[in-house]
Image (cartoon, rainbow, N blue to C red):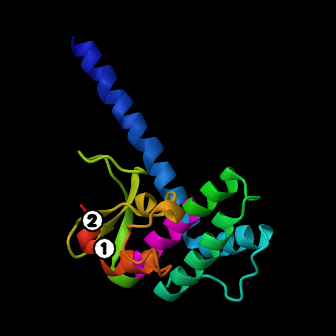
């Protein structure tokens, strides 16, 4: 029995090492998410006049481009999923810069869209940016969705959306 417990502990440590390595990759990808989004939008025929940065203003512009690309029937589901993933990284990075926090691995009791969340500095609560951005073009009831400002509103309401 003790041998089984040791194997479980060893597997958990190995899993945690892999997650920590992936967390570092997430942090690096989040730093370039705006540039990568611009590339994806432009490769799908959407010229961007600005270079998206991790600001609330950029989020609105990114969301506007995303919604236009999502309406285009020629966009592959893979490209749309990649854009949504990058938007989650940009949303998380914007939240970190605007409100304070850090990228973290979440392994708590709640189900998340991604194991990588933003832990808010002041409250210690967790914000799952991926749950906001996945299939965003279909989420009409999300606050700000009708105006194309759902991402910006998510930053403003981060404490209420966090767990």
In the displayed structure, does residue 4 sit left or right of residue 53? left
Depth check: 43 or 20 in front? 43
In the rendered view, tell whether residue 73 sits above or below residue 161: above
Q: Which residues are magenta?
A: 85-97
User: The C terminus is located in which quarter?
Assistant: bottom left
Q: Position of residue 136 (x, y in %)?
A: 50, 63
1 and 2 marks in contact (CB < 8 Å): yes
Residue under label 1: 158
- Is 21 a magenta residue? no
Q: CA distance from mark 1 to mark 2?
A: 6 Å
For residue 162, the mark is 2
In the displayed structure, does residue 140 sit left or right of residue 161? right
Depth check: 153 or 103 in front? 153
Q: Position of residue 66 (x, y in %)?
A: 61, 71
Q: Residue at x 43, y 43 (%)?
A: 17
User: Residue 130's quadrant in the figure?
Assistant: bottom left
- Is 94 a magenta residue? yes
Helix, strand or loop status at disc 2? loop
In the displayed structure, does residue 127 sit left or right of residue 52? left
User: The N terminus is located in which quarter?
Assistant: top left
Q: Position of residue 14 (x, y in %)?
A: 42, 35
User: Residue 126's quadrant in the figure?
Assistant: bottom left
């Amino acid at each position: 029995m003790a041998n089984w417990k040791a194997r479980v502990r060893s597997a958990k440590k190995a899993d945690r090492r892999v997650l920590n390595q992936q967390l570092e990759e997430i942090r690096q990808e989040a730093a370039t998410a705006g540039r990568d989004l611009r590339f994806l939008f432009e490769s799908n025929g959407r010229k961007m006049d600005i270079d998206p940065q991790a600001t609330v203003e950029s989020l609105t512009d990114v969301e506007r481009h995303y919604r236009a690309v999502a309406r285009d029937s020629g966009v592959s589901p893979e490209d749309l999923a990649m854009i949504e993933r990058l938007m989650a990284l940009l949303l998380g990075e914007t939240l970190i810069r605007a409100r304070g926090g850090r990228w973290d691995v979440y392994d708590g009791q709640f189900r998340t869209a991604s194991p990588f969340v933003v832990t808010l500095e002041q409250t210690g609560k967790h914000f799952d940016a991926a749950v906001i951005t996945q299939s965003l073009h279909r989420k009409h009831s999300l606050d700000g969705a009708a105006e194309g400002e759902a991402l910006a509103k998510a930053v403003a309401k981060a404490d209420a959306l966090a767990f």
